[in-house]
Amino acid sequence: MMNLSSVFEFILPGLPKQPEDQDMYSALFLLMYVTTVLGNLLIILLIRLDSHLHTPMYFFLSHLAFTDISFSSVTMYFFLMFGAIDNFLLTSMAYDRYVAICHPLHYTRIMSQSVCIILVIASWFLSFAGALVHTVLLARLSFFRGNTLHHFFCDLSALIKLSSSDTSINELVILIVGSLVVTVLFICILVSYGHIGATILRTPSIKGICKALCTCGSHLSVVSLYYGTIIGLYFVPSSNKTNDKDVIVSVLYTMVTPMLNPFIYSLRNWDMKGALRNILLRRMYSQ
């Protein structure tokens, strides 16, 4: 007879590793998490303290930094929500760069403070709604096949594969919401950078080209890293069961990408380095 007792908790084996490597991996992920939190907090602090960074681009970046801290600290419902917010914020930042480079004379009018606030509120609201839909639909599923989830967190796709109920509605909603939140927003980013690239090529000044590339370089690096791992995980076909590749790629976009964002925006961004230098100098002279 099949055991039809419902499952209310799951066992997470974690990463595919040898037991003797447990301490090393624990120390490594603790270091990565602390680096993520401190690095993104530094970005928020610099933007808050330096008036030169009170622009739409850094307004979105401060929210992205906060989202990355939260994204690395939560799971399930809030994980879905903050992951979606990341997509919307990266798209808003791409639109900001598009307006700044393609329509510089109208930048202040188009990217006003009220527009920036509306974009951030819309990002949070739409992400909240999308995550809520997934969570409600997941709650109606039954899990009779076992409670071992071969992952290091309760990933939505891994949970659905483990369910013994009909998951066709869940998969349809994932397809629709995923297409809107990931595919459509990624296309918007590509279109923005397509216009930016066309504008740069029409610029006769080498100095203007270098300035435009410097302005977009950090954001483009983050977009490539973030969407590259997501596409590799969710759009490249894999086996029915969650395999080692899925778990390792999940580590890249849940922990590595949020950790690298502060380094990308600080090492490749003269404004951020200048703000950090000014704050340190003020601190030294005030003592």
Image (cartoon, rainbow, N blue to C red):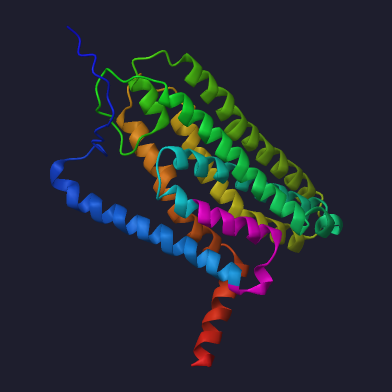
Relative height, residue 97 to residue 150 (above, below): below
Q: Residue at x 37, y 43 (%)?
A: 251
- In the image, 57 versus 271, the foreground residue is 57
Which corner quadrant of the image does residue 152 belong to? top left
Which corner quadrant of the image does residue 84 belong to? top right
- Measuring from the top left, give residue 245's x and y in whole percent: 34, 32
Quarter the N terminus occupies: top left
Q: Along the horizontal axis of the image, is 11 left or right of 115?
A: left
Residue sitting at the far top: 1
Relative height, residue 204 to residue 83 (above, below): below
- Measuring from the top left, give residue 75's x and y in whole percent: 40, 42
Residue sitting at the far left: 20
Is residue 159 one of those drawn in magenta?
Answer: no
Asked if residue 239 can be seen in this view, the reply is no
- Measuring from the top left, give residue 10's x and y in whole percent: 27, 31
- In the image, 249 versus 207, the foreground residue is 249
Q: Residue at x 24, y 50 (%)?
A: 25
Task: Identify the magenta region.
Answer: 49-67
Asked if residue 169 can be seen in this view, the reply is yes
- In the image, 10 versus 89, the foreground residue is 10
Q: Residue at x 40, y 50 (%)?
A: 73
Relative height, residue 160 to residue 117 (above, below): above
Relative height, residue 242 to residue 131 (above, below): above
Q: Residue at x 70, y 53 (%)?
A: 117
Magenta portion: prevailing SS class: helix
Is residue 55 one of those drawn in magenta?
Answer: yes
Residue sitting at the far right: 105
Q: Along the horizontal axis of the image, is 204 left or right of 86?
A: right
